[in-house]
Amino acid sequence: MSSVLVTGGAGYIGSHTAKALAAEGFQPIVFDNLFRGHRWAVKYGPFVEGDIRDAEAIRSAMREHQIESIIHFAALAYVGESVEQPGLYFSNNVEGLRTVLQVASEEGVDKVVFSSSCTTYGNPERVPIDESFPQSAVSPYGDTKLIGEHLLRWFETSSGTRSVALRYFNASGADPDGELGEDHDPETHLIPNAILAAMGRIPSLSLFGTDYPTRDGTNVRDYVHVSDLASAHVASLRYLMEGGASTAFNLGSETGSSVREVISMVESVSGKAVPVVEGPRRAGDAIALYASALKAKNDLGWNPVHSDLRTICQTAWRWHSTR
Ligand SMILES: NC(=O)c1ccc[n+]([C@@H]2O[C@H](COP(=O)([O-])OP(=O)(O)OC[C@H]3O[C@@H](n4cnc5c(N)ncnc54)[C@H](O)[C@@H]3O)[C@@H](O)[C@H]2O)c1
């Protein structure tokens, strides 16, 4: 059984990916400091508690578990927090990845799948966004992801480490079997917050901007189901194992959904009203972002099957209803 080090595997996307790896015959070894992740979400293989900036902790996990490849999720991922604390983000995300790549190169682990982000495209001039678009991040968080992609390139030059950078759009939904879901604190994502507002667990959902030049005045984003992201990681690993060259893939549903459309869908699947407080636009928010994911479909054979908005909201609602 091929052992995969899953950094950040106690988090949202990492835990769903550990499940998909185990189902496909891989052994996921979760390495996480539990700063934002959950011990309960590690269910599909061994757990090592440690920080990605601790080279010796990574080395010992790699040796003990005979790691052959890495899926690197571990990062801090709040845009607003990154603007307030850029030092924390560069230390955690950039120094963390550098340490992982350094140890991997010393230990002969030469395949890495990296969580990049659509934020590396900044505010693109048009949609859909494909991988050839210029990358220019507009937040410290986005820059840590962009630098991450550069680090991968330079470690390939120096050590031969091949990589796939997966540029996710908005991860959403929950495990269709109900075993896992999104549990962030603080929660900044639209769909869980709409659900929490419908449940009365938060007083209301804040809607930033109703005068955008979109079909209903609200921002448009691309929501992709977390289990579809998980399957893309397994496909990326197989691609690298079969000798595939380093590259980057967008992962999105290729559908733009507006904030109001998301709210309506949450109301439809839950049968409850979402209390909304409308406010002005937030500085820096792009009008509309959605992906072309053709490259992942063609080169990885990626086939997203859960990423329609109804399934996303239904699985997320079911998950939150059990909490
Ligand atoms: N959620 C999204 O929509 C989205 C979109 C694009 C990219 N991403 C990226 O995907 C990855 C996973 O996102 P997520 O939503 O699952 O986030 P998450 O916060 O749920 O998971 C991240 C995990 O990394 C761990 N971690 C953070 N710093 C660490 C460190 N120094 N050492 C060890 N573990 C550490 C956290 O404890 C957490 O379990 C992140 O790299 C994020 O930037 C997420």
Image: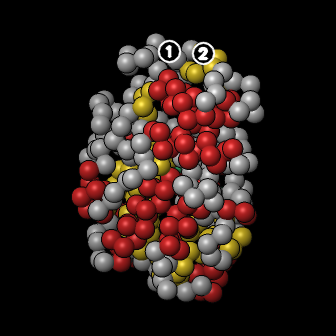
Q: Name the amino acid, label 1.
A: Thr
Residue of label 2: 278
Outermost residue, left direction?
A: 298
Q: Quadrant of ligand 1?
A: bottom right
Q: CA distance from mark 1 to mark 2?
A: 7 Å
Q: Indicate yes or no: mark 2 CB to ligand 1 under 8 Å.
A: no
The colour mode here is secondary structure
Q: Where residue 280 sits: x, y (%)?
A: 57, 14
Residue of label 1: 210
Residue 130 is left or right of residue 47, and the answer is left
The crowd level at tag 1 (other Cα within 10 Å; few <14, some 14-19, many 20+) is: some
Q: Is residue 145 visible?
A: no
Residue 9 is left or right of residue 152, and the answer is right
Residue appearing at x 65%, y 82% in the figure? 60
Residue appearing at x 47%, y 27% in the figure? 261
Q: Where residue 310 sits: x, y (%)?
A: 47, 39
Q: Where residue 76 sits: x, y (%)?
A: 61, 50
* Foreground of the two, 322 or 296: 322
Residue appearing at x 69%, y 53% in the figure? 36
Give the vertical position of 121 relative to 14 (above or below). Answer: above
Q: Are marks 1 and 2 in contact (CB under 8 Å)?
A: yes
Q: Is residue 185 visible?
A: yes
The crowd level at tag 2 (other Cα within 10 Å; few <14, some 14-19, many 20+) is: few
Instruction: Residue 234: name its quadrant.
Output: bottom left
